[in-house]
């Protein structure tokens, strides 16, 4: 009897851990172990086979931080993040406000707004690439401009951001719609009775009430955008197809240094610097959470 | 009950976790059939053509000798994949043979599992006479005096021109030097009243590939870097700065830039040429088929040998394309012999002629020109003949370098050449930028790897 009791007690502690085990193993193998290895590697001279040769202190960091290409990719990443996260959330918010009231036809446009979520990044990139062509592309034709979207240093990053903004609208829209629909109708109703117009209601009631969702979207979008590499790699990848202006981001630069150029020294150091910058940005955002986010 | 459920669930999860880790067995060779795994890098029409070679091999020699070739598309860079496997020490998953670009040869050379073409030439089942293979193509995949890979798909840099536009501008022959190219660009450009260029004389982004050709072609031939451009031993520096060939090229190229009819970045170069936006484009012969399909009967176009830097240059063009390298992952000599059968088959005259017709790649086997129907084929497709003649007229020492860090060198050249063309850099800044940055990157590589 006592034995069984003890067994049950042990099981009580062990069982939840067992459930967590698969996730923990994945995290250890694919997140924490590589992170620690990258961190340590960034202080070593590493050869093209990935072997650590000898300790070099901060040499890798100094070289990367002095590299004008790295300055450029940092700038690109910031432009991308600043353009993408707010714009796609704003557009999604407007769409969610419009789609707020469930009607008979709302299913149709809800699906339409959310559909960009289901697009493949590379397919979207290919479609936009055609549209961006300066001489035969649709965009210049419609706008009546002669902009070389992808091959001009000023425009290239904006062009890339537009694709991503468009693609993220669906995801943000779903979250914001759910949040807005979750607001207690009686609050809005009493505001209406008090004479509040749509703008006032949005700014003073809806926005504060959905601020946790907004905060979540800002944080996740920002982290995702700082770590973006897919579009940059698609547009600048090897071969004769793509000769885009420099649209590399911190992570695509890291990838290219490590994988294409077998330069793990620059690759590891870049990864750590990119992580540090993103981490600081996250910390700043969480400070804002205390002031700006309202949990009821 | 609950406990049993927990255990079952745990077991299932564990099984899921480790399922991916189990080593994937190669298709079992049954008693009398051997499977040869071949990784290729081709897509679209070219993939169909290369898979057709495997199929026809399986139906003929393969059937007779009990060999089945399994052609697998592995993305456009096999060297990268092999490198990844090598880093993980996973040589068991190496294919029997793989198609790689020249730049991957020095790293392939370091794999213990590599079986060089040189070693196979003395094998008992060798039917190929290596002298039948074009010498410049052989040299492309020769490292430290040893024949490493077997060339399969080869191409040459050419000047594509819109015949109608040239005629209209009063140009009888396509330019043979960069200076002439600049003059023609000036004549061919069309500028509207707002000062915007509506038609360019030339479109090309100068990258590593084009640069290797323009540097290599100078004089009798010229190497891009030391150790014969990395073909004798690893390349440690670029030599085009100290021997003056880069300055020669840039001085001539400046004339093209100053013509005002040159577009230095590439967007959709094939389509734009086909729409008559550019009168000339500078690209690989591998695109002849594509241009043919895009242009159709809309206008007359042709190709010409790549323009020379100096009028008396004799070097010609570098061989572009790829080769097949062989491996012995299972330490099984009979397996290697089977792979060798297939590699020899790929470069046999009949197969190469068919592959040329399907893809436009220049045949690697000289005996192709003795094949029935070859004259008729070339009379119908004169553009291919220009590419073949360009390779035949070139010095085998004109090659793309084995520069190890080819992607870095590519982006250095690309960035400086665009900056030069757009007036953001002077000739000297462009020259020194390319030379110094290439050398810094090479030095960094050797520091980490010696």
Image: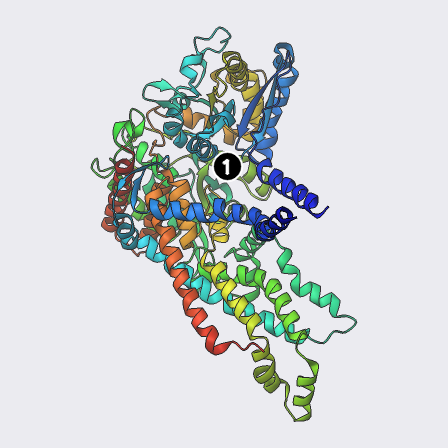
Q: How is the image coloured?
A: rainbow
B392, above or below B206, in the image: above
Seen from the viewer's position, the closer of residues A247 and B170 is A247
Looking at the image, can residue B377 be seen? Answer: no
Residue B204 located left or right of residue A221: left
B303, above or below B370, in the image: below
Q: Position of residue B282 (x, y in %)?
A: 43, 41
Q: Position of residue A166 (x, y in %)?
A: 57, 62
Residue at the far right: name it: A104
Looking at the image, can residue B123 be seen? Answer: yes
B180, above or below A231, in the image: above
Q: Position of residue B185 (x, y in %)?
A: 39, 48
Helix, strand or loop at mark 1: loop
Q: Position of residue B243 (x, y in %)?
A: 21, 35
Residue at the far left: name it: B242
Q: Please tell me in which quadrant of the rendered image residue B72 appears.
A: top right
Residue at the far front: name it: A1
Residue visible at 63% across and 88% down? A197
The image quadrant where one finds the C terminus of chain A is bottom right
Residue visible at 57% across and 36% down? B43
Q: Which chain is disc 1 placed on?
A: B
Q: Which residue is mark 1?
A: B76
Callout 1 crowding tier (Cα within 10 Å): few <14, some 14–19, many ≥20:
some
Residue visible at 71% across and 67% down? A109
Residue at the far top: name it: B124
Seen from the viewer's position, the closer of residues B340 and A23 is A23
């Amino acid at each position: 009897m006592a034995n069984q009791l003890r067994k049950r007690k042990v099981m009580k502690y062990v069982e939840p851990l067992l459930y967590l085990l698969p996730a923990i193993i994945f995290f250890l193998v694919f997140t924490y172990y590589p992170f620690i290895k990258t961190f340590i590697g960034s202080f070593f001279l590493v050869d093209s086979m990935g072997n650590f040769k000898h300790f070099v202190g901060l040499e890798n960091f100094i070289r990367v931080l002095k590299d004008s290409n790295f300055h450029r990719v940092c700038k690109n990443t910031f432009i991308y993040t600043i353009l993408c996260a707010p714009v796609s959330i704003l557009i999604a918010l407007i769409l969610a406000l419009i789609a707020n009231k469930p009607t008979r036809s709302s299913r149709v446009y809800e699906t339409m707004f959310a559909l960009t979520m289901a697009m493949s990044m590379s397919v979207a990139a290919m479609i936009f690439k055609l549209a961006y062509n300066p001489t035969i592309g649709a965009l210049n034709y419609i706008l009546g401009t002669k902009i070389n979207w992808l091959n001009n240093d000023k425009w290239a990053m904006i062009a890339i951001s537009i694709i991503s903004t468009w693609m993220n609208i669906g995801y943000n829209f779903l979250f914001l719609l759910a949040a807005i629909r979750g607001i207690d109708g009686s609050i809005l109703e009493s505001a209406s009775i008090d004479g509040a117009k749509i703008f006032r209601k949005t700014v003073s009631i809806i926005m504060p009430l959905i601020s946790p969702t907004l905060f979540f979207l800002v944080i996740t979008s920002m982290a995702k955008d700082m770590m973006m590499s897919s579009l940059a790699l698609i547009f600048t990848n090897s071969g004769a197809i793509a000769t885009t202006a420099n649209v590399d981001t911190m992570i695509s630069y890291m990838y290219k240094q490590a994988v294409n150029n077998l330069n793990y020294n620059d690759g590891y150091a870049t990864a750590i610097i990119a992580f540090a910058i993103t981490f600081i940005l996250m910390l700043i955002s969480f400070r804002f959470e205390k002031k700006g986010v309202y949990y009821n | 009950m609950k406990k049993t459920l927990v255990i079952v669930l745990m077991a299932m999860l564990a099984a899921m976790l480790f399922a991916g880790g189990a080593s994937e067995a190669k298709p079992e060779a049954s008693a009398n059939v051997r499977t040869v795994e071949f990784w290729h890098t081709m897509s679209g029409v070219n993939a169909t053509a290369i898979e057709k070679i495997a199929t026809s091999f399986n139906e003929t020699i393969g059937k007779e000798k009990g060999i089945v070739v399994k052609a697998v598309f592995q993305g456009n860079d096999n060297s990268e994949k092999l490198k990844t496997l090598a880093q993980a020490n996973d040589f068991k998953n190496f294919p029997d043979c793989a198609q790689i670009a020249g730049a991957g040869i020095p790293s392939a050379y370091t794999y213990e599992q590599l079986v060089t073409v040189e070693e196979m030439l003395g094998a008992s089942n060798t039917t190929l006479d290596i002298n039948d293979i074009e010498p410049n193509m052989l040299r492309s995949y020769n490292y430290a005096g040893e024949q490493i890979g077997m060339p399969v798909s080869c191409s040459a840099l050419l000047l594509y021109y819109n015949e109608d536009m040239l005629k209209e501008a009063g140009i009888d022959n396509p330019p043979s030097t960069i200076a002439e190219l600049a003059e023609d660009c000036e004549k061919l450009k069309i500028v509207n009243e707002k000062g915007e260029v509506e038609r360019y004389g030339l479109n090309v982004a100068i990258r590593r590939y084009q640069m290797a050709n323009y540097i290599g072609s100078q004089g009798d031939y010229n190497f891009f870097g030391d150790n014969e451009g990395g073909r004798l031993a690893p390349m440690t520096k670029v030599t085009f700065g100290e021997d003056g060939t880069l300055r020669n090229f840039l001085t001539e190229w400046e004339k093209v830039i100053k013509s005002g009819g040159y577009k230095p970045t590439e967007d959709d170069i094939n389509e734009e040429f086909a729409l008559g936006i550019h009168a000339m484009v500078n690209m690989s012969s591998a695109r002849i088929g594509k241009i043919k399909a895009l242009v159709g009967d809309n206008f007359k176009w042709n190709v010409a040998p790549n323009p020379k830097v100096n009028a008396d240059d004799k070097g010609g063009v570098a061989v572009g394309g790829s080769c097949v390298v062989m491996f012995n992952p299972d330490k099984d000599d009979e397996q290697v012999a089977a792979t060798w059968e297939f590699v020899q088959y790929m470069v046999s005259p009949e197969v190469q002629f068919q592959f040329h017709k399907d893809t436009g790649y220049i045949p690697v086997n000289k005996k192709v020109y003795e094949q029935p129907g070859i004259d008729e084929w070339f009379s119908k497709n004169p553009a291919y003949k220009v590419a073949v003649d360009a390779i035949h007229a070139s010095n085998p020492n004109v090659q793309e370098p084995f520069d190890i860090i080819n992607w870095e060198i590519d982006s250095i050249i690309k960035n400086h050449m665009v900056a030069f063309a757009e007036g953001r850099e002077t000739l000297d800044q462009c020259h020194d930028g390319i030379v110094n940055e290439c050398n810094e990157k090479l030095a960094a590589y050797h520091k980490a790897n010696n």
